[in-house]
Amino acid sequence: MPIIQFKDQNIHCDKQQILLDELLAAGCSVPFSCRAGLCHSCLMYATAGTPPKTAQQGLNQEQLQKNGFLACQCHPDADLVVRLPSHQHDAMPAIITSVTALNQVVKQVQISPSRLIDYHPGQQIKLTHHGHERTYTLVSHPEQDQELIIHVQRIAGGNISQWLCESAAPGDTITLCDVQGDCYYQSKNPHSPLVLIAAEVGLGAMLGVIQDALWHQHRGPIHLIHHVPSVADLYLQDSLRELCQRNQQLSYHTVVGSWTKDSLPQLTYLQQSHFFFAGATPRIMEYWTTLQQFNIPLSQCSVISFGLEEVSNQAVDNLDLSF
Ligand code: FES
C-alpha cells in the first residue's frame, strides 16, 4: 500500500482510493472544488516519487516539470512526498472602499490592499473576516485598476458573502492572502478564438479574462455567454454591449434557464477555440459535458469552479449550489 507523506503525516493510501479523499479523511487541509479534473483547485506537487500520468491531464508544462498532479484524479501507485502549491502572498490587511449592487444578489466590492499584489485577472484571492474565509476571483486588472475588484453573490448561510452583500461598508478591514489559480488569459496565441461561458456571478471572472485579452491586444474572435436562471440574474448588460461595440472581435449573448447542447452557439471557429468557463460546480459539469459532445479536449479548457473548496479545520463559507 503506497505511503503518501504530506507535511508531518504519513498516510497509507489504498490504490483503489482517490488521494484527495484519503488526505481529507486523514484531516489534511487540501483545497478542492469540482472533483472532476477540471478546475485545478486540488493541484499538488510531488517532491519525491512520480505521480500517475492519469492525474496530470490538463496541466501545463511548468506544472508538469514540477511534478504537479491533481489530487482528485490521483490513485497513487507508489510512495509520494507531496506538497501544496506555494502561494504568492502572505496575509495582508486591506480596506473595503466601495460596495455596489450589480443586480438583486450580486455586489461589486472594491478593495484597497495595503501593498501591491501581482496577479492575473481570473486568479483567486482568499479573503478573511472575523475568522471566516472564502476565495474570490479577481475581476480587476492590475494595469488598469488601482484597486482590487471582486463580484460577490449573496448565498444563504454563507458567512462572508452575506457580510459582504449586507453589512460591509467602505472603511471596513479584511485580510487577503494566497493569490492562486491558472485560469487566466495567456497571450501565447493571440489569434486563437476564445469562447467564455459564465454561470451567474462567474461573469466577473470571465470579464476579467476578456479585459486582460483586450489589454494584450488579442486578435482572435472572443465570444462570451452569460448563463443565468432568470432574466433578473443578468447584470452588466449595457457595459458588455458597449464593450462589444468598442471591440469588433468581441460578441456576447445570454442564456436564460436550462443549459442544453443547443445553448452553445454554432460558431465557425468552435473546434479551434480555447474555452474558459466559470461557475458553480454543477454548471461547470454541464458545460464540460456539452464540450465533450463537440469533441473539445480538456487541453482546450480553463475552468474556475465555485464549490465547497474550503478545507477541514478551517471556517467554511457555506455555499448553496442550487440554481
Ligand atoms: S480538478 Fe480536482 S477538484 Fe477540480
Image (cartoon, helix red, strand yellow):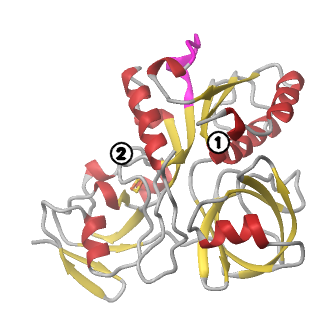
Disc tally is 2
- In terms of secondary structure, what is the magenta stretch mainly? loop
- Name the residue beneath numbered marker 1: 186
Q: CA distance from mark 1 to mark 2?
A: 19 Å
Badge 1 crowding class, 10 Å Cα cut-off, few under 14, some 14 to 19, many 20 or more, is some
**Which sits in the foreground, 212 or 155?**
155
For the N terminus, give its image quadrant.
bottom left
SS at badge 1: loop
Quarter of the view holding residue 42: bottom left
**Quadrant location of ligand 1?**
bottom left
Q: Which mark is residue 96?
A: none
Residue 96 position, x and y percent, is 84, 71
Q: Residue at point 70% right, 21% down?
A: 221
**In the picture shown, does residue 215 fall above or below 64?**
above
Quarter of the view holding residue 2: bottom left
Tell me the amino acid under the disc marked 1.
Answer: Gln
Tell me the amino acid under the disc marked 2.
Answer: Gln
Q: Is residue 213 left or right of residue 21?
A: right
Residue 53 position, x and y percent, is 27, 50
Q: Which residues are magenta?
A: 265-274
Check if residue 242 falls in the magenta segment. Answer: no
Camera sees residue 126? no
Camera sees residue 29? yes
N-terminal-most mark, 1 or 2: 2
Q: Residue at point 66% right, 51% down?
A: 122
Q: Residue furthest bottom?
A: 8
- Name the residue beneath numbered marker 2: 57
